[in-house]
Amino acid sequence: MPAPSYSPAPPRTWAEISFSALKHNFHCARQASHCQIMAVLKAGAYGHGMVPVAKALEKEGLEFFGVASALEARKLTHAGISTRMYLLGPTTAEEREEIVIHQWTPSLSSLDEIQHFNQLAAKHNIKLRVHVTLDTGMGRGGFLPKDYPEAIATIHNLSHLTLEGVGSHLPSADEDQVFTQQQIQLFEQTVSTSPPPYIHIANSAGLLDYTSNLCNLARPGLMLYGISPTQSHQTSLRPVMTLKSKVSLVRTLPKGHGISYGRSTILPHATRVATIGAGYGDGYPRALSLKGAQVLIRGARCPLLGRVTMDQIMVDVSALPLCQAGDEVELFGPNILVSELAQKSNLISWEILTGITPRVTRVYL
Ligand SMILES: *Cc1c(COP(=O)(O)O)cnc(C)c1O
């Protein structure tokens, strides 16, 4: 029997990923930092899809991809990515042999890690290039500055490790200028006595708002995806992801009618209400409920009504008499910035982007 022929339905909610915006932001990062670039690709490239983003950036040429774990490095390696992988935080003991065998680059935080990596590198007859992390205020990993001389002396005395770089991380580059400047100074002072080839401290906010004479590598994440950590640089960036959905129903509901769970919104007058096929099951944050969030339909901002549900949201389209089922909706993107939604919901842009769930189809443009 011939198979019945039909077109499978397109997704209701999808994320359009713009490679031209990604490239644009990458070149912004390079220009603003005057440094080599480690593109941070952890957490599925902040929800954009790690492998497609890596393939697009690799064409532009860069030094490293920053990843969170051996699992992430493996996914990129299996996809044929040849740019070097850098593990952004301390590793678990179980991850280290795979890291050594593939010659991914760890950032070392303890003498135990140093010794273990040396042992494994010796076992596989590999001379592994490593970086040391300094804790200059983040409190998440790294050697304290006073312990830097001991760390690098230990590495120099081991047969199978080569010190290739030293890094640190800025906890408050988008919040506290005085502290961040002191932190960069402390880092430079500590490192300047014996600087290895790569020296790096800047995340997106760091590279956009601070300078360092010593650093020669920057580690942008968020800005590559077109969102500035602070408002001041947003105009030079282009959002890479546009989260889109469709209107599934439009009705006029009478004054006094309730909207969504808890009936927290009661219509003060007759209202044209559009239902949209996206919700917190797609990663559109439930925390946006009742916070004045808007979506874009036919070029107009339409306010959210009531609580965000798992698969659907409702918006007021009284100002759009032509709005009908099937209309395309921008939930966030170039017109409704994810940072605007973050601010309204008391979330952060990083969290919203990484929270877009797997059921949202990524469409690469
Ligand atoms: C995530 C991360 C970055 C990127 O930070 P953004 O603020 O997204 O630019 C840089 N360095 C380290 C160590 C990180 O963990």
Image (cartoon, rainbow, N blue to C red):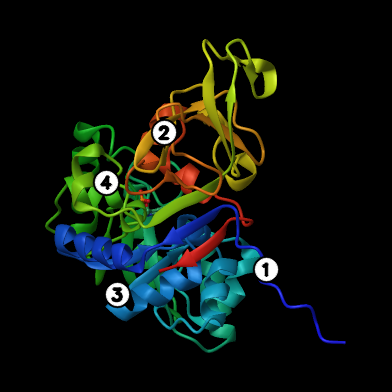
The quadrant of the picture occupied by the C terminus is: bottom left
The amino acid sitting under disc 3 is Leu
Q: Residue 320 carries which label?
A: 2
Find the distance from the CA under tag 4 to the CA under tag 2: 39 Å
Residue in front for this viewpoint, 254 or 231: 254
Which is in the foreground here, disc 4 or disc 2?
2
Pick out the residue farthest to the front: 322
Q: Kindly check if marks 4 and 1 are in contact, taking CB atoms under 8 A apart as contact.
A: no
Q: How crowded is mark 2: few (under 14 residues within 10 Å), some or many (20 or more)?
A: some
Find the distance from the CA under tag 4 to the CA under tag 1: 43 Å
Residue 169 seen from this side: yes
Would the CB of label 4 be found within 8 Å of ligand 1?
yes
Q: Kindly check if marks 2 and 3 are in contact, taking CB atoms under 8 A apart as contact.
A: no
Residue 316 position (above or below residue 334)? above
Residue at mark 3: 62
Q: How crowded is mark 3: few (under 14 residues within 10 Å), some or many (20 or more)?
A: some
Residue in front for this viewpoint, 249 or 27: 249
Q: Sequence-wise, which precedes: disc 2 or disc 1?
A: 1
Q: Position of residue 331 (x, y in %)?
A: 46, 43
Q: Position of residue 255 (x, y in %)?
A: 57, 12
Secondary structure state at the residue bearing disc 2: loop
Q: Sequence-wise, which precedes: disc 3 or disc 1?
A: 1
Q: Residue 168 carries which label?
A: none
Residue at mark 4: 205
The amino acid sitting under disc 4 is Ala
Q: Sequence-wise, which precedes: disc 4 or disc 1?
A: 1
Which is in the foreground here, disc 3 or disc 1?
1
Residue in front for this viewpoint, 352 or 132: 352
Residue at mark 1: 8
